[in-house]
Image: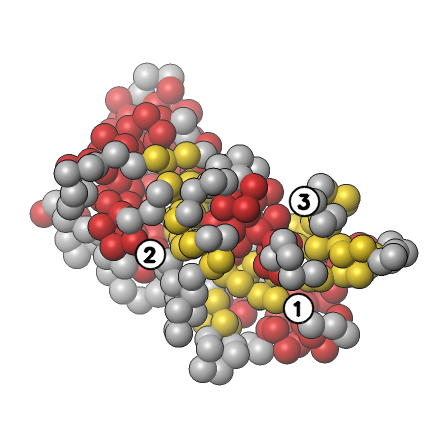
Amino acid sequence: MDQALRIGIDLGGTKIAAIALDANGKTLAQSRTGTPRNDYRATILSIATLIAEFTEHPGYIPYIGIGIPGSLSPATGRVQNANSTWLNGKPLKEDLKHALGRTVKLANDANCFALSEAVDGSGEGARNIFGVIIGTGCGGGLVIDQAIVDGPRGIGGEWGHNPLPWPEPDEYPGPKCWCGRMGCMESWVSGPGMAADHARSFGETLTAEDIASRAEQGCGKARKSLDRHASRLARGLAGIVNIFDPDRIVLGGGLSNMAHLYDQLPGLVTPHIFSDNTHIEICPPRHGSESGVRGAAWLWGRSAV
């Protein structure tokens, strides 16, 4: 009897990751390749090549889910809001279906991350979770009862392009974001956002990882940059709590590896929560950097295949 093979693809700005899971979520195979930046056709070919590695197993029926930056517009079926801008306006789902010869499911990569952590990760057992991506960009995903909340515009959880709440005088109007607006959360709390803030403040060009490392070594300037970053992240998360009221928040992306966030954020969020119960659980991802690709594989659901 043929078994279901869930194949997940995480289409990132620099790499494309692939995973194959059995019906119980056990990893059967993994692979990855570089993303052909600014080349749409080569991106489709790279995805198809990765999937071909997994579909040769006899006795399995492949079900393919793909996490993408941005989302599919329900109105046009084309990619919108992707910071991998060469995807915007393209009929990616239809082109992949044609290239692969089978139906695929696509979802925002932050939604895939949130789904993965809700199914069998740090959000397991919680009814409502908000999954956060803070890395090269800033995204989010809402999951209720292990189902992604997308909305009629396909932008559910897209908090990265909302403005920073409760800004200080020197935070307004904020830096210009790639989307054309000023002061978006992404321009403040992503890795490049943190690095740019540090450069404006101290005239030093460092990556977010360098800033965190120097702070651990006792550098006062780096510590101040981390504190500003945590304050801004906390205010953004408090806005989510006041609207969505999640049981749990799970952080993902490269910056989620910064251990100080889990110590500082709950206390920093507290003053902004509009309730007498200001406690909020903020957790690291159980599946680490694999959460996004695992969530793409789970797009077909536990019982749908």
Q: Are marks 3 and 1 in contact (CB under 8 Å)?
A: no
Amino acid under disc 1:
Val
Seen in the picture, residue 144 relative to 153 is either above or below; the reply is above
Residue at 34 percent across and 23 percent down: it is 215
Q: Are marks 2 and 3 in contact (CB under 8 Å)?
A: no
Locate residue 218 relative to residue 4 in the image: left or right. Answer: left
Lower sequence index among marks 2 and 3: 3
Residue located beneath label 1 in the image? 104
- Distance from label 3 to label 1 (Cα)? 19 Å
- Label 1: few (<14), some (14–19) or many (≥20) C-alpha neighbours in 10 Å: some
Locate residue 27 relative to residue 300 in the image: left or right. Answer: right
Seen in the picture, residue 128 relative to 73 is either above or below; the reply is above
Question: What quarter of the picture does the N terminus occupy?
Answer: bottom right
161 and 108: which is toward the camera: 108
Image location (x, y in percent) of residue 226: 30, 32
Locate residue 263 relative to residue 105 in the image: left or right. Answer: left
Give the quarter of the image for residue 83: bottom left
**Of marks 3 and 1, the one in the foreground:** 3
- Label 3: few (<14), some (14–19) or many (≥20) C-alpha neighbours in 10 Å: some
196 and 166: which is toward the camera: 166
Give the quarter of the image for residue 8: bottom right
Residue at 48 percent across and 82 percent down: it is 76
Lower sequence index among marks 1 and 2: 1
Residue located beneath label 3 in the image? 25
- Distance from label 1 to label 2 (Cα)? 26 Å
- Label 2: few (<14), some (14–19) or many (≥20) C-alpha neighbours in 10 Å: many
Residue located beneath label 2 in the image? 159
Amino acid under disc 2:
Trp
